[in-house]
Image: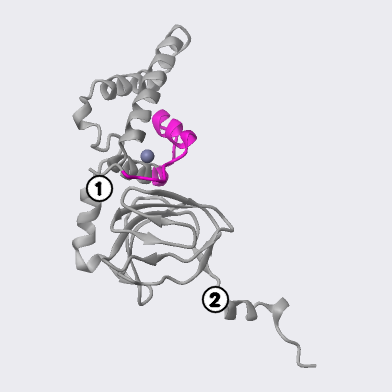
Amino acid sequence: MNNSTNFHPTDSMLIEFSAGSLGVAPSICVSAHLHFCASCRAQLKRLDQVGGQLLGASNSFAVDDDAFDKLMEKIDRAEEPVAQENSNRKMPFSVNKLLSKALVKDSWQRLTSSVAIARFRTGQEEFEVALHKIFAGGKTPKHDHHGLEYTVVLKGSFSDEHAVYREGDFLVRKPGDIHQPMGANNGDCICLSALSAPIKLTNPLGFLMQPWLRINPM
Ligand SMILES: [Zn+2]
């Protein structure tokens, strides 16, 4: 597994992931990143150990049934051999499983001439979880975001105005961020993404349609 990942989840996301309090959709993305990133796996292991100790220390207080299960879960995880660390521990899927969806031709729906999407059924209403394929050399429409978007590059690479993103890179787009991803020329790029709201296209002609910008002929 390459270890050249440049963009990682924040510490606070890893802490929430370790505690099991991160939402399903972002957790899927963090899991995918962990598959590629040894340094975040090591960081998570430290967090899991600290979390286990804290949970152990709180045993002298009133402990609900759930807490015991959580503790057992943490112990189980701490005992996993290092070699298996890159298997996804919290999610019932692996990156290879995710990518196997990419191989099924029927999964894909063409969004534009350069982008296709394959959606997952996650039972999530808040997030749309999907694979996005940016075709080699393809340019996506310039767009901004109403909500949060988590992206992990699973295969190939793409770039935008800011940087080049390679396998394993973990990106968070916040509301108001505007960017225009472009596929690398040497092959299709497949990304996993979790979107909390539909993307709004920022085609300049779109603005003309907005009433306050309409030209009044009178
Ligand atoms: Zn990382």
- Labelled pair 2, 1 in contact (Cβ < 8 Å): no
Q: Is residue 184 above or below residue 91?
A: below
Q: Which mark is residue 95?
A: 1
Mark 2: give few (<14), some (14-19) or many (20+) Cα within 10 Å: few
Q: Residue at x 25, y 44 (%)?
A: 2
Quadrant containing the N terminus is top left
Q: Which badge, 2 or 1, comes first in the chain's sequence?
A: 1
Residue 109, percent from left and from top: 31, 70
- Tell me the colour scheme of the image: one colour
Q: Residue at x 36, y 72 (%)?
A: 138
Residue 90, percent from left and from top: 31, 35
Residue 5, percent from left and from top: 35, 45
Residue 205, percent from left and from top: 58, 81
Q: Which residue is mark 2?
A: 203
Q: Is residue 111 above or below residue 87?
A: below
Q: Nearer the viewer, residue 125 or 161?
A: 161
Quadrant containing the C terminus is bottom right
Q: Amino acid at mark 1?
A: Val
Mark 1: give few (<14), some (14-19) or many (20+) Cα within 10 Å: many
